[in-house]
Image (cartoon, helix red, strand yellow):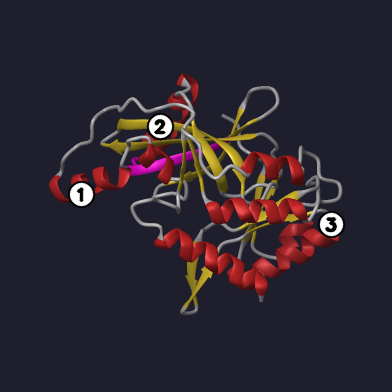
């Protein structure tokens, strides 16, 4: 499994020694959130399209977070693998494919579907997780590039944003984690889950449409979705084999509150 070329910068002087990145370049934080001077600083991801743009975005993150990563852009389909690990033993393997991302350039998914386990991805992902001595639930995010190879993008040793999909497929990672922490009870080794179950996040889907409505970025190297075909594909709110992260018949209130807030913010 490959990795994108990445540099850690602590100053703009470090940037001058890393001037051979192609554009667009990815500017991202090392942490989802960190505590600096009694304040929570949330991580961000941005894209730079020129040397001047890169310097500006790096300077902004250095001022706010103290350090920042610049990374080469990788184009490909997003694939996720998750599991429960205890004592080097892997339980509950699950895999999914990103269908749409909130930001089409690369971000959290707004829609993803369950897919069969890929033996090679399972082997490589579990090797990474177990080599760290990690215990608990974790996910590995990678991209499959044009030649079929896999490129590692992230490892999350915590509940992740798209955890609603395995839950809808019958794998309740949160409950198994609680049972293990409180009772020392191990989960089942494997659960056969339905394939091609599509899980969407309504607010994420709306933001996806809003982002592509703004148009394809100049000099964008990869495929970029078009607005009207995307709207047609997304227009059906439900069909068999589809569920939502944020809209459940048993309790619609959180999803409705999220949608209301989405429209209110944009109305302002």
Disc 2 crowd rating (10 Å Cα; few below 14, some 14-19, many 20+) is: many
Q: How many marks?
A: 3
Tell me the residue at 75%/46% (across/down).
227
Q: Which residue is mark 2?
A: 94
Give me the C-alpha separation between circle 1 and circle 3. 48 Å
**In this rendering, position of residue 56 left or right of residue 90:** right
| Residue lying at 51% horizontally and 59% vertically, measured from the top left | 32
* Closer mark to the observer between disc 2 and disc 1: 2
The quadrant in which the N terminus is found is top right
Q: In this orientation, does residue 225 appear?
A: no
Q: Which residue is mark 3?
A: 51
Which x, y percent locates residue 139? 44, 41
Q: Which residue is at the front of the view, 147 or 212?
A: 212
Whole-percent x and y of residue 83? 36, 36
Q: Earlier in the sequence, mark 1 or mark 3?
A: 3
Q: Is residue 52 visible?
A: yes
Could you tell me how far apart the alpha carbons at marks 2 and 1 are, in whole angstroms? 21 Å
C-alpha gap between disc 3 and disc 2: 40 Å
Q: Position of residue 52 (x, y in %)?
A: 84, 61
Q: Quadrant of residue 100?
A: top right
The answer to whether mark 3 and mark 2 are in CB contact below 8 A is no
Say left or right for 134 vs 101.
left
Mark 3 crowdedness (10 Å alpha carbons): few <14, some 14-19, many ≥20: some
Write down the residue under mark 1: 181
Q: Position of residue 137 (x, y in %)?
A: 34, 43
Sequence order check, earlier mark of 3 and 2: 3
Instruction: Identify the mark nearer the N-term, 2 or 1.
Output: 2
The dot on residue 217 is none
Q: Is residue 15 left or right of residue 101?
A: right
Q: Main secondary structure of the magenta part?
A: strand
Tell me where the magenta segment starts and ends, as one range.
132-142
């Amino acid at each position: 499994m490959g990795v994108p070329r990445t540099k850690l910068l602590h100053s703009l002087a470090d940037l001058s020694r890393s001037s051979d990145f192609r554009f667009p370049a990815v500017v991202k934080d090392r942490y989802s959130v960190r505590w600096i001077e009694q304040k929570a600083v949330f991580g961000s991801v941005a894209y730079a399209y020129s040397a001047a743009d890169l310097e500006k975005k790096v300077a902004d993150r250095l001022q706010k977070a103290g350090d920042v990563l610049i990374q080469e852009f990788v184009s490909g389909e997003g694939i996720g693998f998750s599991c429960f690990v205890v004592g080097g033993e892997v339980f509950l393997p699950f895999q999914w494919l990103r269908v749409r991302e909130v930001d089409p350039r690369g971000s959290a998914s707004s829609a993803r579907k369950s897919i069969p386990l890929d033996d090679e991805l399972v082997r490589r992902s579990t090797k990474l997780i177990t080599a760290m001595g990690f215990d608990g639930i974790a996910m590995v995010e990678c991209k499959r590039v044009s030649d079929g190879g896999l490129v590692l993008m992230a490892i999350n040793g915590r509940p992740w944003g798209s955890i609603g999909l395995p839950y809808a497929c019958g794998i309740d990672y949160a409950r198994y984690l609680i049972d293990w922490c409180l009772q020392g009870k191990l989960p089942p080794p494997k659960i056969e889950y339905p394939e091609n179950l599509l899980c969407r996040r309504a607010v994420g889907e709306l933001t996806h449409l809003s982002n592509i409505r703004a148009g394809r970025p100049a000099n964008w190297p990869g495929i970029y979705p078009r607005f009207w075909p995307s709207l047609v594909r997304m227009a059906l709110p439900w069909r068999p084999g589809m569920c939502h992260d944020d809209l459940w018949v048993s309790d619609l209130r959180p999803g409705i509150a999220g949608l209301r807030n989405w429209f209110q913010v944009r109305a302002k």
